[in-house]
Amino acid sequence: MRILITGAAGFLGSHLCDRFLAEGHTVIGLDNFITGNPDNIAHLTGHERFSFVRHNISNYTYIAGELDGILHFASPASPIDYLEHPIATLKVGSLGTHNALGLAKAKGARFFLASTSEVYGDPLVHPQTESYWGNVNPIGPRGVYDEAKRFAEAMTMAYHRAHGVDTRIIRIFNTYGPRMRPNDGRVVSNFIVQALKGEPLTMYGDGNQTRSFCYVEDEVDGIYRLFMHGDAQPTNIGNPNEFTVRQLAEIVLEITGSRSQIVSRPLPEDDPKVRQPDISRARRMLGWEPKIDLREGVRRTVEHFRSVVR
Ligand code: UDP
């Protein structure tokens, strides 16, 4: 297949480029480097089935030749990033999704939307099933991301229903692993970098809020299977093992052997109190479930950050 991946220089986008190339496909990567990093795809330079376009998908996009699939992964995705780029975040979820869908329709390509567990907001249903409509504050600081992704889902379903585009919607839960930026701001990368530098681990609030962390290799496998074998209904892909943020801090200290302290910092506004995917649908439809537990994933991520952090 000939595949376009938006956000190709990002954390997930770059791992997806690797996976699609490894499966024998041809990949066109697209990124404007607003949060993506050229280093993430530097190893693909000169690959005979890989090419790259520097472009903002929120603007009109032309790609020559046939396309069989478009994976729309472009977006700031870390809370600190979408707070710094609120309008670009809204635009890439809305205008960017519209452009990518228009391209998919014109090319007769399958369209795959990277959506998020953030569509569930601060959830009142736990764990979250795909049938839950969410509890989102549209005008809060996280609204720029949450509502952009909710709009993107609505637009994707509209192109599916009105134009018959073959579409997929994945709801990605917290994912971590090599190629996260050291200053990404997400909790796993923050804690690992802080532990390796001997700095205090910044636990927001009382640390009793929960997240369920999926190692990137498992997430990418779920994405690939959903792209190949899924249907148009939204699908949760994430690791259902739930941890408090405090537990994560303790695991990071244990694995790094760091003697850093854990310090408390104010909880960001609208920070979800709990998050855990119900992955029954992915298990049933795709035969997918994560294989790498948190300790093993953190071990591998720590190895990566040891070579990046000094
Ligand atoms: N968090 C934390 N310390 C940090 C960064 C994040 O305690 O240095 C908390 C944050 O408040 C949230 C959880 O860790 O409750 C996950 O945050 P992250 O930014 O990784 O992603 P989110 O799931 O909130 O989008």
Image (spheres, rainbow, N blue to C red):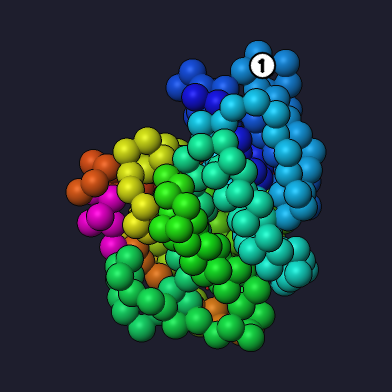
- Queried on whether the Cβ of the residue with tag 1 lies below 8 angstroms from ligand 1, the answer reads no
Point 63% across, 86% down: residue: 139
Q: Secondary structure at mark 1?
A: loop
Q: Residues within 10 Å of mark 1 (few under 14, many from 20)?
A: few
User: Percent position (x, y) of residue 259?
Assistant: 59, 58
Q: Nearer the viewer, residue 296 or 132?
A: 132
Disc 1 marks which amino acid?
Answer: His
Q: Which residue is mark 1?
A: 47
User: Percent position (x, y) of residue 148?
Assistant: 60, 68
Residue 91 quadrant: bottom right
Q: Is residue 238 magenta?
A: no
Point 73% across, 21% down: residue: 45
Report whether residue 84 is seen: yes
Q: Nearer the viewer, residue 177 or 299?
A: 177
User: Percent position (x, y) of residue 27?
Assistant: 60, 27
Q: Classify 10 as above or below 242.
A: above
Q: Quadrant of the C terminus?
A: top right
Q: Nearer the viewer, residue 176 or 123?
A: 123
User: Percent position (x, y) of residue 7?
Assistant: 66, 45
Q: Main secondary structure of the magenta part?
A: helix
Report whether residue 256 is seen: no
Q: Classify 66 as above or below 121.
A: above
27 left or right of 54 in image: left
Q: Residue furthest left?
A: 284
Q: Nearer the viewer, residue 301 or 13?
A: 13
4 left or right of 287 in image: right
Point 37% across, 35% down: residue: 228
Q: Classify 304 as above or below 18.
A: below
> Magenta region: which residues?
278-283
Point 33% across, 48% down: residue: 231
